[in-house]
Image (cartoon, helix red, strand yellow):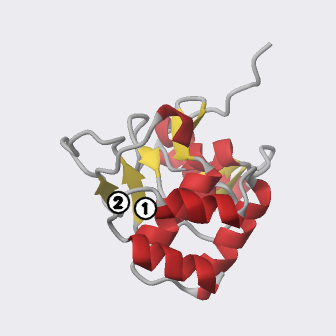
Amino acid sequence: MPAPRMPRIDLWPVAVRSAELLRGTLVRCGPGHRLVGWPESPGVRLQALAPWGSESRIAVLDTAAWAWGALRAPGAVLDFGTGGQRAGGSRAPMTRIHEFAYSEDEIVDFGGFRVTTRVRTVTDLLRHAEQFTRQHRVACRLLLMEADQGRADLRDRIAHGRRQYRATALRRLDAL
């Protein structure tokens, strides 16, 4: 039997959402909402982002780290990837679209909402975070603790991966 799927709160009328927030049935979850009875988990967090990221988008960078529970907030701007396809179509406010390419084993699907794996999220943060803050270092450590891959494997992956931002990623990895 498949796990129950959280209702799409973003499809509820605004008045109903507002009333349920006041009643306490809904609580904030990042910039979105979740039902109070649904504990925060990667799938619930991703579904709370439904108004900003469509099911064709992949949560990346800070947004992915937040979905995995490694950051307290997904950031002022939500980061989504296209899986290597062109970023056409309309863009929701508060979003930034990246045309990063991913293999199927670097993406986890939570009921139609997708996020990069923990290891790929760390790799992306090491390579692409505009400012690598203390929160990013802590998030990377937390994500690596939960992943099946150690720092030596990650160092090897970065060293033998794409050349773009390799030196920056290796320097940041050493700072962890």
Residue matched to label 1? 78
Q: Nearer the viewer, residue 35 or 113?
A: 113
Name above or below for residue 37 compared with residue 24: above
**In the image, what residue type sits under mark 1?**
Leu
The residue that appears at 49% across and 32% down in the rendered structure is 104
Distance (Cα) linking label 2 and label 1: 5 Å
Residue matched to label 2? 95
Q: Is residue 31 visible?
A: no
- Expressed as whole percent of the image width and height from the top left, the position of residue 57 reads 40, 42
Viewport quadrant of the C terminus:
bottom right
- Residue 53 horizontal side relative to residue 136, left or right: left
- Residue 43 horizontal side relative to residue 90, left or right: right
Q: Secondary structure at mark 2?
A: strand
The residue that appears at 65% across and 70% down in the rendered structure is 140
Q: Secondary structure at mark 1?
A: strand
Q: Are marks 2 and 1 in contact (CB under 8 Å)?
A: yes
Q: Crowding near pointer 1: few (<14 within 10 Å), some, many (20+)?
A: many
**In the image, what residue type sits under mark 2?**
Thr
Viewport quadrant of the N terminus:
top right
The image quarter containing residue 150 is bottom right
View extreme (top): residue: 1
The residue that appears at 18% across and 42% down in the rendered structure is 88
- Expressed as whole percent of the image width and height from the top left, the position of residue 48 reads 57, 48
Q: Nearer the viewer, residue 7 or 157?
A: 157
